[in-house]
């Protein structure tokens, strides 16, 4: 009987074995309801180690459980122009051979459809690569005002501007849009640089209507890369009525970047949100909200979520999912968003990096988006009054019919209690609590009065749903044991009682004194919170990209480098790396490098305490710091 049960369980789809109520909601067979969708921007080349459509197809089930409804594929076309930009296509009707074939794309879309997910392609209408097929076969597509003149838009030297005043070019582009519907059954297009002054608004009006009506029974959705609703340029203003279904809330995202990790007055955040909502109310289409995407993650000076938003990245993630519109998750953001991905080189996502707080926050937010009618894209926002006033707390409700949600954010750097007034009295269910979400999802019933006190931790957040729901207990804490992913990995582990945004700065003599961190400016690179010990202490990790030599010196800091955990000559003159992997096995005293490598011979070799020679090439070293004491990982 036991064998039969195990066999039957093995036949069940993954979504039937959901680990908690959030997984059960996100893995529901029939989802993808308009107005309750979450979109994921995927760079195929970065998403898996193989960098192929076939490999990405195998991970679609994970995206389903995460709560993804729409997969937006960054350009999948062959690349040209000399710098390998995905936005320099050489042929609109081919697949980048590094990613696979048209058949592979078709299989990817079919697998997504089986999971009730949509697939949108990234469309690059303004330009082609300078070595695109059309350059030789149809040079007239690039002509301008009757002249066969090639121009670089925005001084981008790898691409040529297309001419939308040539009706043959318009037909060719529209045929390419139809091609992917016919060949791969795609569901929509994210359209790049639609605010180009060289693409007339009339083109979009005609093309969107044409493609939307192209195939009976097939819905095609258009997302435009521009802040159309805000309409800061004449071109954007002209795009308001051309037929896009979504635009970018670009100005709103930009307004959030300057917050950093310091205290933030809620009134400023509320003002920026109100500006975005006011613009949205004047248009017929909806908006996509996001904290990062490929442009922000790679092209800007502040690339990672920590660099852009500091500790605010958590409450601002909650705000992006609950304020308005369709939320976007960028390529690997569920790991914490602290990896800068060079999309010219298809930098691989490090899936070994985990941020349980971010992951559990995101998947709970996607479950809320799917399950709560009040979180429909265009449901209005009602700001909650705080009495007495609390400058660091932002609170609002959204309500439609009998469905209502309450969001409370503390943007301050200290815990606080806020008194909310004018609430709907009665039963409420706490779905998301910043103080427990790292450990896992839970759900707890509470009874509110019209005036209610709510206590939040620093940068804390809570999301409540009005009504009575089953209570869900927190899972038992999962203990993290420091380990290396490979034998060659060079990492530092740091254990501490306090959860903060820690950074590590490292350098060494062996490599000429240069920094070993990805970022060469102080305070170095963010450490990743990997998990907790059985006693609740936090373990952070940083893996160095330079592994041929171990750095000799390092500093750990927080508060943007202003507070150093380890500082001074006594610290930085110590060598903190020893050879090994997997398990802490030996305590190293703080007396310095001689405790690890106690002698150096004339031949340049080091020796450990047992007398074993350690060659420079073999010095693949890791560190585990706990209460100021050093443990080797070997």
Image (tube, rainbow, N blue to C red):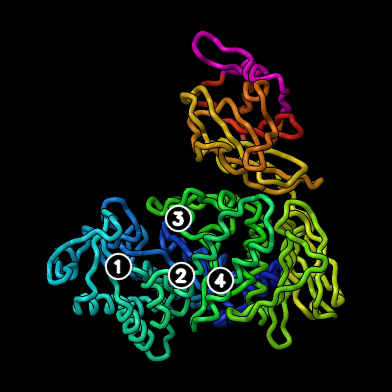
Front of the two marks 2 and 3: 2
| Marker disc for residue 569 | none
Q: CA distance from mark 2 to mark 3?
A: 27 Å
Q: Are marks 4 and 1 in contact (CB under 8 Å)?
A: no
Front of the two marks 1 and 3: 1
Q: Are marks 1 and 3 in contact (CB under 8 Å)?
A: no
Image location of residue 453, percent across then percent down: 85, 67
Determine the secondary structure under disc 3. helix
Front of the two marks 1 and 2: 2
Mark 4 vs mark 3: which is more N-terminal?
Answer: 3
Q: Does residue 421 appear in this view?
A: yes
Image location of residue 520, percent across then percent down: 50, 36
- Quadrant of the frame with the N terminus: bottom right
Residue beneath the point at 50% across and 14% down:
604
**Residue where numbered disc 4 is placed:** 276
Image location of residue 391, percent across then percent down: 74, 60
Determine the secondary structure under disc 2. loop
Q: Which residues are magenta?
A: 586-613
User: Which class describes the residues within 10 Å of circle 1: few (<14), some (14-19), or many (20+)?
Assistant: many
Horizontally, residue 516 falls left or right of residue 474, namely: left
Q: Are marks 2 and 4 in contact (CB under 8 Å)?
A: no
**Residue where numbered disc 1 is placed:** 126
Residue 46 lies, with reference to residue 454, above or below; the image says above
Q: CA distance from mark 2 to mark 4?
A: 10 Å
Q: CA distance from mark 1 to mark 2?
A: 17 Å
| Marker disc for residue 46 | 3
Q: CA distance from mark 1 to mark 3?
A: 25 Å
Front of the two marks 4 and 3: 4
Determine the secondary structure under disc 4. helix
Dominant secondary structure (helix, strand or loop) of the stretch shown in magenta: loop
């Amino acid at each position: 009987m036991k064998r039969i049960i195990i066999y039957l369980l093995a036949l069940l789809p993954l979504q039937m074995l959901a680990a908690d109520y959030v997984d059960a909601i996100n893995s529901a067979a029939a989802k993808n309801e308009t107005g309750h969708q979450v979109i994921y921007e995927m760079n195929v080349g970065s998403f898996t180690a193989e960098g192929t459509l076939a490999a990405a197809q195998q991970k679609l089930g994970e995206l389903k459980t995460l709560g993804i409804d729409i997969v937006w594929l960054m350009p999948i076309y062959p690349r040209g122009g000399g710098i390998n930009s995905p936005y320099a296509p050489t042929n609109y009707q081919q697949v980048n051979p590094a990613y696979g074939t048209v058949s592979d794309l078709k299989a990817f879309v079919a697998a997504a459809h089986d999971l009730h997910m949509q697939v949108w392609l990234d469309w690059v209408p303004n330009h082609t690569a300078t070595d695109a097929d059309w350059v030789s076969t149809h040079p007239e597509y690039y002509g301008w005002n009757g002249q066969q003149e090639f121009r670089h838009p925005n001084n981008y030297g790898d691409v040529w501007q297309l001419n939308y005043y040539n009706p043959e070019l318009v037909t060719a582009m529209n045929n390419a849009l139809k091609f992917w519907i016919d060949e791969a059954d795609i569901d929509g297009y994210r359209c790049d640089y639609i605010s180009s002054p060289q693409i007339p608004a009339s083109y979009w009006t005609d093309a969107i209507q044409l493609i939307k009506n192209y195939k009976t029974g097939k819905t095609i959705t258009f997302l435009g890369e521009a802040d159309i609703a805000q309409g800061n340029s004449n071109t954007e203003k002209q795009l308001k009525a051309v037929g896009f279904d979504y635009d970018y809330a670009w100005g709103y995202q930009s307004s959030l970047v300057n917050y950093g990790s310091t205290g933030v007055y809620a009134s400023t955040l509320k003002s920026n949100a109100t500006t975005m909502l006011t613009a949205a109310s004047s248009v017929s289409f909806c908006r996509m909200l996001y904290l990062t995407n490929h442009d922000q993650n790679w092209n800007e000076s502040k690339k990672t979520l920590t660099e852009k938003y500091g500790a605010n990245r958590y409450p601002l993630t909650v705000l992006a999912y609950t304020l308005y519109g369709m939320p976007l998750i960028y390529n690997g953001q569920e790991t914490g968003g602290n990896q800068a991905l060079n999309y010219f080189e298809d930098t691989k996502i490090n899936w070994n990096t985990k941020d349980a707080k971010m992951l559990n926050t995101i998947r709970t937010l996607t479950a809320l988006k799917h399950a709560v009618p009040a979180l429909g894209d265009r449901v209005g926002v009602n700001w909650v009054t705080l009495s007495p006033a609390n400058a660091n707390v932002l609170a609002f409700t959204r309500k439609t019919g009998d469905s209502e949600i309450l969001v409370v954010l503390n943007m301050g750097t200290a815990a606080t209690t806020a008194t909310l007034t004018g609430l709907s009295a009665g039963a409420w269910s706490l779905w998301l609590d910043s103080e427990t979400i790292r450990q896992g999802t839970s759900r707890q019933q509470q009874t509110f009065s019209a005036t209610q006190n709510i206590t939040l931790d620093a940068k804390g957040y809570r999301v409540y749903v009005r009504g009575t729901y089953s209570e869900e207990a927190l899972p038992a804490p999962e203990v993290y044991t420091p380990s290396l992913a490979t034998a060659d990995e060079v990492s530092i582990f740091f254990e501490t009682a306090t959860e903060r945004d820690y950074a590590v700065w490292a350098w060494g003599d062996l490599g000429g004194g240069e920094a070993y961190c990805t970022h060469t400016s102080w305070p170095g690179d963010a450490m990743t919170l990997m998990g907790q010990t059985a006693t609740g202490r936090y373990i952070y990790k940083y893996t160095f990209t330079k592994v041929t030599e171990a750095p000799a010196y390092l500093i750990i800091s927080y508060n943007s480098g202003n507070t150093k955990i380890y500082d001074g000559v006594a610290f930085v003159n110590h060598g903190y790396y020893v050879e090994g992997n997997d398990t802490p096995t030996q305590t190293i005293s703080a007396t310095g490098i001689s405790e690890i490598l106690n002698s150096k011979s004339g031949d340049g070799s080091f020796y450990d305490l047992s007398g074993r020679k350690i060659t420079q090439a073999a010095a693949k070293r890791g560190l585990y710091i706990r209460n100021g004491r050093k443990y080797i990982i070997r």
